[in-house]
Amino acid sequence: MTLTSNTSLSADVEAAAVPVSSANDSAIDAAAAGDFHLGSQEEAPPPAPPLQVQIEMNSEEQRRLHHHEEQQPADLDDIESPSSASDTTNVEVTAAQFQFYDDEAAATDGGENDVTFSTTSTAAASSSSAVARASVSFHPKHLDDDDDEAAPSNPRTLIRRQSSKFATYALKVDPNQGDRAAEIKLCNFSRPHMRAFHFAWWCYHVAFLMWFAISPLLGEVQKSLDLTTEQIWTSSITAVSSTIIMRFILGPFCDKYGPRLPMGVVLMMSAIPTGMIGLVNTATGLAVIRFFIGVGGSTFVMAQYWTTRMFTKEWAGTANATVGGWGNLGGGVTQILVGSILFPLLKNAYGGGDEGATKAWRTACVVPSAIGIITAICVVKFTDDSPTGNYSKMKKTNVMADVSMAKSFRHGALDVNTWLMFVQYACCFGVEITMNNAAALYFREAFGLSTESAAAVASIFGWMNLFARGTGGFISDKANARRGMNGRLWWQTICLLLEGFLVIVFAYCSSLG
């Protein structure tokens, strides 16, 4: 593919394009052409007419482009990924605006006649492409009036739009799904996909650590503050009610601000009252402070939004379920950490007896609170909202449009499927958090166990999430692959029926054996 003054060039290659600078849109001048490495060519080519780039865009994308053209020369940064229903428009660009790397030509002719630019370009065929793609074709012609060679009739190329903050990805991605990851590598922690995956489940896990940190110690709290069983249950109800409220609110917040910032804010809002629960002296105080601690349970919204934003629909079920399950696992871990480890250690440190037990439950929750504060800071600093970067930066550069929270909420609230899922989720997750709240106290009263032993037995319910929820998501993905959404719904129905049956069996158990 030698470019000379006696030939015309028509590309039929896979190429990558990266914006490098603004330039004169009228023509590809000699200076810009001079950036090409022309193989054995000794003589710089004469000026060529503008490069005609044909791009597939839907009507909204065309509208945005035409509006932009009124303000400044066209730049492919302003063009979104092509949608399924698209038209075609033409844009004139210059060689100085985009770099083209002809890796296909280099592979076929040994690189002797490759066409490159002086700076490093991104390989077009990479399966971990960091940028959205648009189907284009271009015909640099009329390099010499004496040349009569015709260009191929159907040239093709791919232009990558530099809309991502990442040069490459560690995972395979699908450009047609917004660079979402098409695989899961659990031992990988690279940005953005797997970093978001691990922070999503860890943040939700930490939220559970704080949310139910006091649960294994409620027996000690009841004894120390001389509370009734009804007052203890009231505090557990308030701890759940705040989560319900916040989950309604945070969905639109994620649509507008992304999952990263809401996650950090909510964790901090939950961590502070968790560390202050030792100051409680009345039933009302316990109910109020557990209400604010319960805000942390709404981190589930950001966790699920995040993984859905990072992984393709073929992997979303597995990713969502694993993140949710490992997050819920915190409900079991906190029973062990606070009830079976921290409480006896602190009790002995404070001299034992009733006074030591009282001081122990008042200080034990400081540990999960500290973990929550550290996690809240890290999630804001070291993660990304989406495969292509953070929402705030993407909006500033016009890569994504701003979203109305009211419109987003209205859209979800008016969908009947939302409320059907609401009822089903209440039946499954509602049972789980009831167990997390009450299991330790139940085993202590019904079977005469110590606080430490009751917490250990109660943790079993949470530990099930280590594999159960991820397995459910994996089966759901398989069912979806075979029968679509009906497959997912049938699997969910089976799980709900099985859960209801086992709850009835549990109610009639008279021993722990």
Image (cartoon, rainbow, N blue to C red):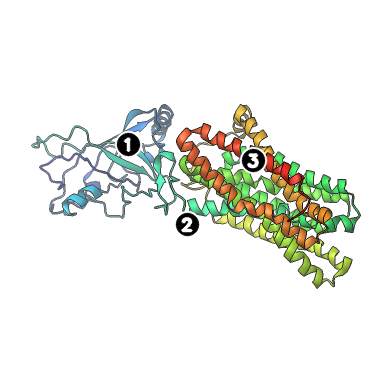
Q: Position of residue 371 (x, y in %)?
A: 67, 60
Residue at point 31%, 51% (across, down): 123
Q: Quadrant of residue 424?
A: top right
Toward the viewer: 181 or 227?
A: 227
| Residue 501 relative to residue 60: left or right | right
Nearest to viewer (mark 3 / mark 2): 3
Q: Please, what is the three-letter code of the amino acid marked with disc 1?
A: Ser
The residue carrying mark 1 is 135
Q: Is residue 303 above or below residue 363?
A: above
Q: CA distance from mark 3 to mark 2?
A: 38 Å
* The label number, if any, that marks residue 190 in the structure image: 2
Residue at point 72%, 60% (across, down): 456
Toward the viewer: 151 or 70?
A: 151
Q: Quadrant of residue 112?
A: bottom left
Whether residue 270 appears in this view of the structure is: yes
- Label 3 sits on a secondary structure element that is helix
Q: Please, what is the three-letter code of the amino acid marked with disc 2?
A: Ser
- Label 1 sits on a secondary structure element that is strand
